[in-house]
């Protein structure tokens, strides 16, 4: 780090500077600094190794063994099974089903959450009165307890006496049991998740909108560009990094979808709302630690791949 | 480069460590001999006990009688919430830092015994024949008993007597045909919307469905508990009978919300349902009294009493117990018929010891007698460490059969193949 600071005053990197960088560690003052740095960093490094890196590596190791809850007294007396946990997972029809469900959560949830958040952010950006009030109101669901909210929404979605069906009843529609249908349950959960989660993105987008250069928008307006045209060709491109960030964190959130389904549908009906995280949770509670660890690493891999794709699609164009 | 070399080295070390370890062939529970008999004389020293729920709250005061009889013994009870209990016990076993005794849910016995956490019950500590056979069965893992039943619960038929009277029934149904007719009459003449509410799959529905299979003569495993025998004509017939209630609209095909069953029962939406002893309290809280509802044993297929599910809690002593001798003496004391009766008076747990039912309120109350009678034949699921997973797979197949058009025969085939691939874990 210190070499960067050194280089900063001299924007043109010249060979002598590089020379100095290479000889850095041999300089006694630098070495003392490095030692001091490591000593100061050591509490964090130790905590990180013991409580973060350790468990992560241990669970990776577990995913290649047949360890079960009954092995906890002698965790090393288990058999090494190679990638067979991973192979079994890919064969498991329930795992395939929950993978499809998770992808559905992702492709329904992410665009919807981002669209709603953007719509509200643009709306709030164009009003000046009550902006603070609405910002708080729309953000409120994010800070509520997810379990409490899920319980309330469960009652909203009820077939008999549910709020939603009562409202539909006023216009003569006989609403179904939203959470009891294999085709409606998952979209219903997505709608609730969008309502709960768009607040965070809204705040981020609102901040992003402030950074869009006002002169560009005014120039476009003078040139006769429509509101949609200005949004499409000036606001959106300017917000690309913000959109990327939003897509990545929302995507990761939907890939880890769990609590709503856990409280509202218990993964049912007929596994229609069970997600990969839910499946992993089940396997852990059945005591299949090795198998569950393998399932979490597959999910981890999916998150990495998805994030890489999003970075590629939304990166700054040169 | 450096990072990569370190990573490769790390992986190499890890794989060396992993390949160095391996399973011993004889791992797992079962085949262990029962423990040596506990020493004569009074208990002494500190006995640490974990108990859940109301048991955990009340046991501390209740054991003062035991402490009076054994002046050198000191019983320390720690209350543990049910939700946290499974993980807490499992962590304690893994760490070797267990209490001396704990209440263990009957369906956890297999797992904790196979984890090598529980001590086999000492010989001659209690007499197996004193307990309800199904309850004793829950303590046996791979042929060895790892604890003593403490309290039990079983499932019986709850029905609205006033609606039944309107429907022309002045007694409870006693065979499957009668039960079906009863449910139909409850709807057509009694005014109920659903004649008999059964659980259409989801968590715990195996506890409603398996009694039908057991009543029909089916078994879940072979005699030594090594192979599943779920795929049988008896099991298939029982499932077809069970799902016919959904097909004929006698039972609701969606899962009820908490509280909906009791309210619906009080309002007359549900004419009858199958559940355990806790529902007497819930039903009475919902506004019914014994003039409007009654309980009856589950009917068998061709008349006579059916076989229900027995659950409850066992008391087990851990292998890492500091004071196993006094711990077993406490367990022995808690299994005495009059102590079991007092414990019932204290918190209403149904005694696991049959003799406790011969006198007192348990003998006089007709409603309790129904539970007592049902318990004499009730069965527990096999105590294998993988039971929770097998049960979850049965739940999901029951759901498919209840909501879809999966036939009983195909459904039990599916249960069997899933159970087989899960294994017994012993």
Image (cartoon, coloured by chain):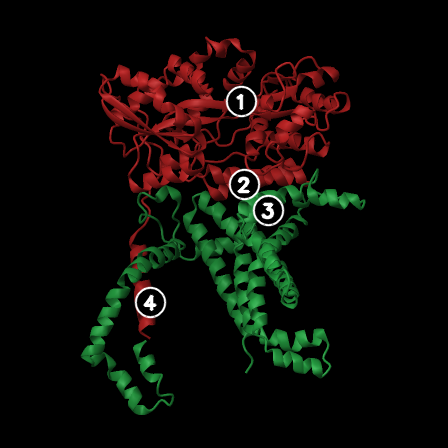
Question: Tell me, what hue is chain A?
Answer: green
- Residue A10 in sight here: yes
> Considering depth in this image, is B336 or B306 the residue closer to the camera?
B336
Instruction: Please report contact status of discs 4 and 1: CB closer than 8 Å, yes or no.
Output: no
Q: Residue at x 35, y 24 (%)?
A: B60
Q: Colour of chain B?
A: red
Q: Local crowd at mark 2 within 10 Å, few (<14), some, or many (≥20)?
A: many
Asked if marks 2 and 3 fall on the same chain, the answer is no
Q: Which numbered disc, 1 or 2, marks the residue that appears first in the sequence?
A: 1
Cα separation, mark 1 vs mark 3, equals: 30 Å
Q: Are marks 2 and 3 in contact (CB under 8 Å)?
A: no
Q: Which residue is mark 2?
A: B393
Residue designated by label 4: B7
Horizontal side of B255 relative to B28 (left or right) equals: right
In the visual, does A27 lie left or right of A316? left
Secondary-structure class at tag 4: helix
Upstream in sequence: badge 4 or badge 2: 4
Mark 1 — residue?
Answer: B277
When the figure is inspected, residue A39 is found, relative to residue B139, above or below; the finding is: below
Pick whichever, B231 or B399, lies toward us.
Answer: B399
């Amino acid at each position: 780090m210190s070499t960067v600071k050194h280089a900063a005053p001299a924007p043109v990197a010249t060979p002598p500077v590089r020379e100095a960088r290479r000889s850095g560690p041999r300089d006694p003052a630098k070495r003392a600094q490095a030692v001091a740095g490591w000593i100061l960093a050591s509490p964090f490094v130790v905590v990180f190794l013991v409580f973060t890196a350790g468990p992560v590596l241990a669970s990776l190791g577990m995913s290649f063994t047949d360890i079960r809850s009954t092995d906890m007294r002698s965790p090393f007396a288990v058999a090494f099974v190679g990638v067979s946990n991973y192979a079994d997972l890919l064969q498991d029809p329930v795992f395939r089903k929950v993978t499809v469900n998770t992808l559905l959560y992702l492709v329904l949830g992410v665009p919807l959450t981002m669209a709603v958040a953007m719509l509200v952010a643009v709306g709030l950006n164009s009003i000046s009165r009550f902006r603070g009030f609405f910002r708080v109101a729309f953000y409120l669901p994010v800070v509520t307890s997810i379990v409490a909210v899920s319980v309330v929404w469960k009652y909203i979605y009820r077939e008999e006496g549910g709020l939603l069906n009562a409202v539909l009843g006023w216009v003569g529609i006989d609403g179904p049991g939203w959470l009891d249908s294999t085709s409606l349950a998952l979209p219903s959960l997505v709608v609730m998740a969008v309502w709960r989660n768009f607040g965070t993105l809204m705040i981020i987008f609102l901040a992003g909108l402030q950074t869009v250069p006002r002169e560009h928008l005014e120039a476009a307006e003078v040139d006769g560009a429509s509101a949609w045209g200005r949004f499409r060709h000036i606001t959106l491109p300017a917000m690309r990094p913000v959109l990327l960030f939003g897509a990545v964190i929302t995507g990761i959130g939907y890939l880890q979808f769990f609590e709503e389904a856990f409280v509202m549908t218990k993964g049912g009906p007929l596994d229609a709302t069970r997600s990969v995280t839910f499946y992993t949770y089940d396997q852990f509670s059945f005591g299949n630690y090795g198998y569950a660890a393998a399932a979490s690493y597959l999910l981890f891999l999916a998150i990495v791949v998805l994030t890489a794709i999003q970075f590629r699609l939304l990166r700054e164009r040169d | 480069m450096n990072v990569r070399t370190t990573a490769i080295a790390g992986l190499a070390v890890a794989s060396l460590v992993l390949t160095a370890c391996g399973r011993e062939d004889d791992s797992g529970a079962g085949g262990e001999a029962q423990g040596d008999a506990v020493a004569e004389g009074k208990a002494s020293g500190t006995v640490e006990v974990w108990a859940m729920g109301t048991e955990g709250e009340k046991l501390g005061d209740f054991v003062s009688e035991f402490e009076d009889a054994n002046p050198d013994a000191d019983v320390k009870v720690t209350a543990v919430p049910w939700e946290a209990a499974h993980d807490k016990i499992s962590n304690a076993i893994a760490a070797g830092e267990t209490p001396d005794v704990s209440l263990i849910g009957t369906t956890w016995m297999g797992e904790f015994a196979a984890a090598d956490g529980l001590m086999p019950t000492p010989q001659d500590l209690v007499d197996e024949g004193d307990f309800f056979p199904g309850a004793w069965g829950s303590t046996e893992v791979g042929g060895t008993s790892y604890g003593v039943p403490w309290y039990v619960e079983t499932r019986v038929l709850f029905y609205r007597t006033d609606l039944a009277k309107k429907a022309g029934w002045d007694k409870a149904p006693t065979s499957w045909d009668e039960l079906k007719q009863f449910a139909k009459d409850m709807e057509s003449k009694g005014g109920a919307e659903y004649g008999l509410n059964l659980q259409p799959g989801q968590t715990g529905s195996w506890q409603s469905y398996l009694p039908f299979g057991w009543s029909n003569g089916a078994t879940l495993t072979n005699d030594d508990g090594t192979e599943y025998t779920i795929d049988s004509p008896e099991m298939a017939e029982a499932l077809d009978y069970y799902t016919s209630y959904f097909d004929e609209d006698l039972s609701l095909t969606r899962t009820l919300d908490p509280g909906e069953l009791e309210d619906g029962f009080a309002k007359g939406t549900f004419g009858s349902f199958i559940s355990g002893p806790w529902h007497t309290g819930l039903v009475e809280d919902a506004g019914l009294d014994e003039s409007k509802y009654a309980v009856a044993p589950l009917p068998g297929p061709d008349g006579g009493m059916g076989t229900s599910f027995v659950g409850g809690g066992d008391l087990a002593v851990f292998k890492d117990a500091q004071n196993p001798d006094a711990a077993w003496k406490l367990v022995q004391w808690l299994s005495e018929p009059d102590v079991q009766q007092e414990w019932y008076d204290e918190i209403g747990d149904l005694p696991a010891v049959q003799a406790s039912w011969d006198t007192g309120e348990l003998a006089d109350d007709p409603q309790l007698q129904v539970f007592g009678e049902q318990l004499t034949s009730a069965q527990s699921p096999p105590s294998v460490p993988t039971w929770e997973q097998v049960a979850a797979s049965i739940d999901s197949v029951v759901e498919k059969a209840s909501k879809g058009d999966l036939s009983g025969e195909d459904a039990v085939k599916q249960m069997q193949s899933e159970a087989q691939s899960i294994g017994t874990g012993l």
